[in-house]
């Protein structure tokens, strides 16, 4: 590490766990990732406390990148689907949490708590930053508790569209249709067919040059379905949400 090198504390917030590590400018993790199970109910102040705890237990950083589910604009939470519930995804929504999360300035709160410059983005946007080539129209889907997404045009981040909350069929959102709950209910083979149907539908809408599929469940897509998705699909490792914390500052 040189005297002027930036060291990024990267926080990857999911519906089931909150992971963190520190990464140098070359994208090398300087410590094994730490994981905290996502607690519920989860008011925004508690998430800030978890970030501070990770910062205190990892090597010192010079800046922070945080990726979290939902619609995030300029570090402010417009809406987040999982953290407003009593016991996690698919459980009862708590109206008080909806109010507390709406327009919560997470970037400002973390900066105040840690005294470090901070960027807060949608978690798929951070993961995408870690894998894109920077040429053409590139999209990433992340498969975990729900469905995440981000789009990049020649390396520039496009305005976020929260595909996860769109309706697929029978009143089901994409989160409902291919989230972890459905994977466990259906089994990987049937769930993989759903992933292929979603990819086929989104391809016609976005006409990407490359689609990256990441998140913890990307490795569970069956080889039979993956082979039918096309050669414009790239499976990326789950640590993209950490490694992308560095390149997110260049978006």
Image (cartoon, rainbow, N blue to C red):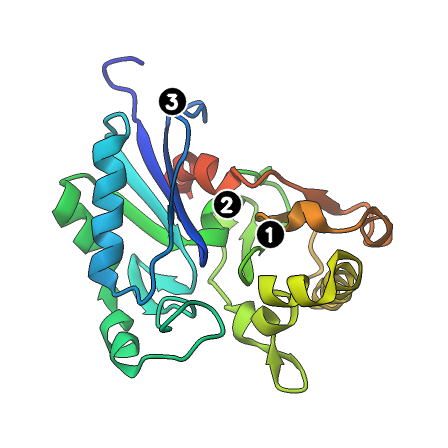
Q: Nearer the viewer, mark 1 or mark 3?
A: 3
For residue 30, the mark is 3
Horizontal and vertical percent position of residue 23: 38, 28
Q: Nearer the viewer, mark 3 or mark 2?
A: 3
User: In the image, is residue 228 above or below residue 7?
Assistant: below
Is residue 13 among what the camera can see? no
Q: Residue furthest top?
A: 2
The answer to whether the residues at label 3 and label 2 have Cβ atoms under 8 Å apart is: no
Residue nearer the viewer, 110 or 203: 110
The residue under label 1 is 140
Horizontal and vertical percent position of residue 34: 38, 36
The answer to whether the residues at label 2 and label 1 have Cβ atoms under 8 Å apart is: yes
The residue under label 2 is 127
User: In the image, is residue 231 above or below residue 158?
Assistant: above
Give the spatial CA distance, label 1 vs label 3. 26 Å
Give the spatial CA distance, label 2 vs label 1. 8 Å
Query: Total of numbered circles in the picture?
Result: 3
Position of the N terminus, as image quadrant, is top left
Horizontal and vertical percent position of residue 8: 32, 32
Give the spatial CA distance, label 3 vs label 2. 18 Å
Q: Residues within 10 Å of mark 2 (few under 14, many from 20)?
A: many
Residue nearer the viewer, 91 or 30: 91
Mark found first going from the N terminus, 2 or 1: 2
């Amino acid at each position: 590490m040189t005297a002027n090198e930036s060291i990024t504390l990267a926080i990857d917030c999911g519906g089931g766990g909150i992971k963190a590590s520190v990464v140098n400018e070359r994208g090398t993790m300087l410590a094994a990732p730490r994981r905290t199970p996502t607690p519920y109910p989860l008011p925004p102040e508690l998430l800030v406390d978890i970030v501070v705890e990770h910062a205190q237990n990892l090597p010192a950083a010079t800046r922070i990148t945080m990726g979290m589910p939902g619609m995030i604009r300029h570090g402010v939470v417009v809406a987040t689907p999982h953290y407003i519930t009593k016991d996690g995804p698919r459980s009862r929504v708590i109206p008080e949490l909806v109010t507390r999360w709406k327009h919560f300035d997470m970037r400002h709160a973390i900066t105040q708590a840690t005294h470090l410059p901070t960027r807060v983005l949608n978690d798929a946007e951070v993961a995408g930053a870690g894998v894109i080539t920077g040429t053409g129209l590139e999209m990433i889907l992340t498969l975990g508790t729900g469905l995440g997404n981000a789009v990049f045009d020649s390396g520039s981040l496009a305005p976020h569209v929260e595909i996860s909350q769109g309706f697929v069929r029978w009143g089901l959102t994409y989160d409902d249709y291919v989230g972890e709950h459905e994977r466990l209910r259906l089994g990987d083979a049937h769930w993989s067919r759903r992933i292929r149907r979603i990819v086929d539908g989104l391809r016609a809408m976005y006409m990407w040059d490359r689609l990256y599929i990441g998140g913890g469940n990307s490795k569970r897509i069956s080889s039979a379905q993956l082979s039918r998705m096309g050669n414009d699909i790239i499976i990326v490792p789950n640590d993209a949400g950490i490694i992308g914390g560095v390149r997110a500052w260049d978006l």
